[in-house]
Amino acid sequence: MKQFIFLICGVISIVFLSGCISGYHIGDGFPRTLPGVLFADQTSGGYIAPKMESMKDVIILGPVEATVECSELFLLVSEGNASIGKAKKLALNQYPQADDVVNVEIDVQHKSVLSILNRVIMHYRGIAIKYKR
C-alpha cells in the first residue's frame, strides 16, 4: 500500500511541477498552451525585436537563421546552450563580414516525453547587416 501511495505522489508531482521546471513562460504576448505532461511537440513565438526604421546607414547582407537547443533528462540532468548570444553568433557566422543582426524573430519549440526527456529548441531568424563607416 505504501508503495502505491508513493507512486501516486510521484505521478502527481510530475504532473504539477513539469510546467514550472521546464521554464515555460506565459503572459508575454505569444499565445500557447503549457507543454503536455505525457507528450509535447509544440512551437510558439518567443520574441520579436522592433524593426529597424531606416536602413540607410547599413549594408544589407541577407537573411540568417540559427538553431540552438538544450535538453533535460529525468528533471535531473540538463545540458546545452540555447542562449540568444549563441544563436546570434551562429547566425553571424553565415556572413563573416556582418556587424549585427536586425529584425530578429525567435520561435521556441518544446518537445517532451512523459517529462522524462525534455528538449527546448530555439529558432533564431533575422537580417545580417554591415554598418557603413
Image (cartoon, rainbow, N blue to C red):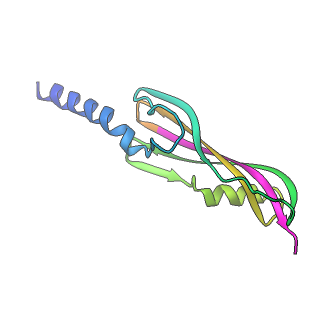
Q: Main secondary structure of the magenta part?
A: strand
Q: Give the quarter of the figure containing the N terminus.
A: top left
Q: Position of residue 3 (x, y in %)?
A: 16, 28
Magenta stretch encompasses residue 70:
no
Q: Position of residue 103 (x, y in %)?
A: 73, 52
Instruction: Tell me where residue 115 sits by quadrant.
Output: top left
Compared to residue 61, the image places residue 108 above or below, namely above
Q: Give the quarter of the figure containing the C terminus.
A: bottom right
Outermost residue toward the front in this view: 53
Q: Position of residue 94 (x, y in %)?
A: 81, 55
- Horizontally, residue 118 falls left or right of residue 87, namely left
Residue pictured at 59% horizontal, 40% vertical: 45
Q: Position of residue 17 (x, y in %)?
A: 32, 39
**Image: magenta residue range:** 118-133
- Horizontally, residue 23 falls left or right of residue 80, namely left
Residue pictured at 70% horizontal, 61% vertical: 89
Instruction: Tell me where residue 15 sits by quadrant.
Output: top left
Residue pictured at 43% horizontal, 29% vertical: 36
Q: Nearer the viewer, residue 129 or 4?
A: 129
